[in-house]
Image: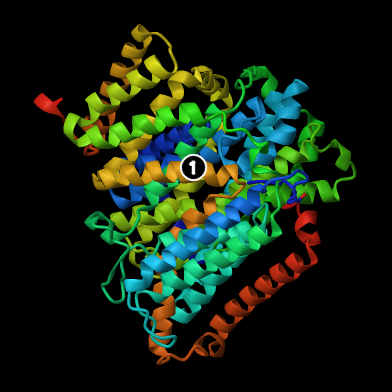
């Protein structure tokens, strides 16, 4: 514990330098704007701004990207509450009761509760990250290829089991992503797979063009098919204070959302999006007045908002401690660290203590910045949403081209983005989730290398996955989840998933 | 993320999931065919082809499952209102991809914004010109000059 506090002090000495404070502030501000803009969620936002971090040192880069990430979580809730437009997918549940509160004249209170919940969840989760990451990194030192393989397979099944909608569809999207991840030069044999004469594909399909295409471009295209955008409500500053009763009603959901979100965020393969769905379902389930949900229930805002912020933070635990991203956003951040020559994983804390603990400390500061800045600024920031969409979307498209091209200075990446935009529209029209595609794309090389290295270790004997205790446990959990999925499919329904609100 | 129930369609015609399932099966089989030239190896010593082939077969199997269950509404139940503006956007993006390294960032983005705001959205050419030039040059100054993001230049260094 003393060592942790000592390290945290080192982190604060890094994070409170004027330079880092500026990057944390810029990240939080840009993230809030990114989270508010429909079509530019945190994933597309981070992807687009990735090239802008190339000139920075690794610590500044991760502090900036971290600020964008949790800033986007705050920003997403603003549009959900005021306009019933989720700026990003994790805010979908906030739309239901947040917008209902707005219609009852409690927009300010809803925004304040979302901000307080996000702050509490974010801050407590950083404590969790701080306490959990070091022992997890120690444990990870005992991980070999079979253990990593088990962990990645488990993550994919958890993703399928906990995502909204059909398990088969989610798995299909994850497999599609894994397949796309096989394009390029095979890391083990040097064979160029699916080349089609394009030597730019040697390093594989980049995560940025895929993420921007699937999320950003497809969202813009789908938005053009919708009716007129809803009216923007501008809350007054004096209305921002929640009543004593509203604060009391939000306390327990914030606590539950924090714990739930943090642990869902940690599980590799799951996404922060799931946490808000599960939290909403839990609050509705245990509420004495479930009929109030959808009509402006305070718990329906406080729970999911806390959960998605806690999950955003929890997702950094496996990313920093194991080098395994738990979702597409940590995957992009992982890529950003690698660009700077930093290898996340068990040795990160020992080799780069200033980076690790500076980032942790900057998260405390970032959460405080968001609370202090966002509430007074919310009236100003929503003005951005008043820009007519006819001007807004062409500008977002230009940003997409800029961001995607700048990563590798490659026009092929722009073509991939265009193709993924079309694919994203089709998939979403057919009610497929697109997040598992991105996650599969990132996990694919790790999964294949772990599998083939494991088999090389055992001279081709597959029992290596069940004879090593950690690997066997992880694979065992994955098998249980797979069997549960098959059983529920055979029964034609999955009662536990419906109870959690993952299926209606 | 959807919360909709996966109920089979009541009307006639192929359902959304059936079409999607058939599409996945077709893609999976195509991918297996494309991977035929890659060395497959053996179960104990997989080659470069085994992982993609296994994934393509899994995709086809999941597609078959979806096609057989055939849930969701009929395909035409959800409109395709975005098709027309969507085509214009794809045309603009394709132009951007083709022109970016020849015309440079500023001229390409100006042309794309002029087309989308002036021709597609019909917001008036004066506004379109103002926004297009303003956005292209300000964003270039911010990203290329201030943040040092490498962006291509066109004729005469524009």
Q: As drawn, is B70 to the left or to the right of A36?
A: right
Quarter of the image where one finds residue A491: bottom right
User: Of helix, strand and loop, which one carries label 1?
Assistant: helix
Q: Give the residue pinned by disc 1.
A: A215
Answer yes or no: is residue B128 visible: yes
Q: Residue at x 28, y 37 (%)?
A: B97
Q: Position of residue A218 (x, y in %)?
A: 49, 38
Q: Subunit of mark 1?
A: A
Looking at the picture, does residue A87 appear above or below residue A341? above
> Above or below — where is A472 with respect to A261?
below
Question: Left of B154 or right of it: where is A115?
Answer: right
Which residue is at a point 29% across and 26% down the rendered structure image? B109
Residue sitting nearer the eye, A22 or A453? A453
User: A399 or A11, which lies in front?
Assistant: A399
Locate residue A68: give its quadrant.
top left
Q: Which residue is drawn at the image coordinates 40% and 80% (left, top)?
A: A452
* Dot 1 crowding, Cα within 10 Å, few <14, some 14–19, many 20+: many
For the question of whether residue A126 can be seen, the reply is no
Please, is residue A213 above or below residue A149 in the view? above
Quarter of the image containing the C terminus of chain B? top left
Residue A51 place in picture, x, y as percent: 30, 43
Q: Position of residue A374 (x, y in %)?
A: 55, 29
Q: Position of residue A391 (x, y in %)?
A: 43, 19
Q: Looking at the image, which residue is at 49% across and 55% down? A: A437
Q: Is residue A77 left or right of residue A216?
A: right
């Amino acid at each position: 514990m003393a060592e942790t506090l000592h390290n945290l002090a080192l982190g604060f000495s890094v994070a409170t330098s004027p330079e880092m404070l500026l990057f944390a502030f810029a990240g939080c501000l840009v993230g809030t704007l990114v989270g508010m803009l429909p079509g530019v969620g945190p994933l597309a936002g981070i992807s687009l701004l990735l090239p802008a971090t190339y000139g920075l040192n690794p610590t500044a880069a991760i502090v900036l990207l971290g600020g964008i990430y949790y800033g986007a979580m705050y920003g997403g809730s603003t549009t959900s509450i005021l306009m019933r437009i989720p700026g990003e997918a994790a805010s979908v549940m906030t739309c239901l009761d947040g917008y209902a509160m707005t219609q009852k004249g409690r927009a300010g209170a809803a925004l304040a509760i979302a901000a307080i919940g996000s702050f509490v969840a974010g801050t407590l989760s950083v404590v969790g990250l701080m306490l959990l990451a070091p022992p997890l990194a120690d444990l990870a030192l005992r991980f070999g290829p079979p253990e990593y393989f088990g962990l990645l397979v488990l993550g994919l099944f958890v993703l399928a089991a906990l995502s909204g909608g059909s398990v088969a569809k989610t798995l299909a999207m994850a497999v599609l992503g894994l397949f796309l991840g096989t394009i390029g030069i095979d890391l083990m044999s040097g064979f160029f797979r699916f080349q089609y004469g394009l030597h730019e594909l040697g390093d594989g399909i980049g995560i940025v063009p895929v993420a921007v295409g699937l999320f950003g471009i497809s969202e813009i295209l789908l938005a053009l098919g919708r009716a007129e955008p809803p009216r923007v409500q501008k809350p007054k500053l004096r209305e921002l204070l929640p009543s004593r009763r509203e604060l009391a009603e939000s306390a327990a959901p914030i606590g539950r959302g924090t714990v739930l979100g943090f642990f869902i965020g940690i599980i590799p393969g799951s996404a922060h999006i799931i946490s808000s769905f599960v939290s909403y379902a839990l609050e509705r389930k245990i509420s004495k007045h479930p009929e109030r949900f959808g009509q402006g229930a305070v718990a329906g805002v406080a729970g999911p908002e806390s959960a998605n912020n806690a999950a955003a933070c929890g997702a950094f635990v496996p990313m920093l401690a194991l080098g395994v991203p738990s979702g597409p956003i940590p995957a992009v951040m992982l890529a950003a660290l690698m660009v700077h020559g930093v290898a996340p994983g068990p040795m990160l804390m020992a080799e780069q203590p200033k980076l690790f603990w500076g980032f942790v400390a900057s998260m405390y500061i970032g959460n405080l910045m968001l609370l202090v800045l966002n509430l007074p600024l919310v009236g100003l920031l929503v003005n951005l949403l008043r820009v007519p969409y006819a001007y807004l979307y062409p500008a977002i498209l230009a940003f997409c081209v800029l961001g995607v091209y700048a990563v590798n200075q490659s026009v092929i990446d722009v073509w991939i983005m265009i193709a993924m935009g079309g694919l994203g529209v089709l998939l979403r029209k057919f009610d497929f989730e697109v997040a598992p595609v991105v996650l599969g794309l990132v996990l694919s090389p790790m999964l294949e290398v772990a599998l083939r290295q494991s088999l090389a270790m055992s001279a081709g004997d597959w029992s290596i996955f069940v004879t090593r205790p950690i690997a066997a446990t992880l694979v065992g959990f994955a098998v249980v989840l797979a069997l549960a999925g098959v059983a529920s499919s055979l029964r034609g329904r999955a009662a536990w998933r419906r109870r959690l609100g993952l299926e209606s | 993320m959807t919360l909709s129930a996966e109920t089979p369609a009541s009307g006639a015609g192929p359902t959304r999931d059936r079409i999607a399932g058939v599409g996945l099966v077709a893609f999976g089989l195509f991918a297996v065919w494309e991977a035929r030239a890659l060395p497959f190896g053996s179960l104990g010593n997989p080659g470069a082809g085994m992982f993609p082939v296994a994934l393509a077969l899994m995709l086809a199997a999941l597609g078959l499952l979806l096609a057989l269950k055939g849930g969701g509404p009929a395909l035409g139940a959800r409109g395709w209102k975005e098709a027309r503006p969507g085509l214009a956007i794809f045309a603009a993006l394709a132009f951007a991809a083709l022109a970016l390294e020849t015309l440079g960032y500023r001229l390409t983005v100006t042309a794309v914004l002029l087309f989308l705001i002036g021709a597609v959205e019909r917001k008036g050419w004066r506004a379109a010109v103002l926004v297009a030039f303003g956005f292209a040059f300000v964003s270039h100054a911010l990203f290329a000059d201030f943040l040092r993001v490498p962006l291509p230049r066109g004729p005469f260094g524009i």
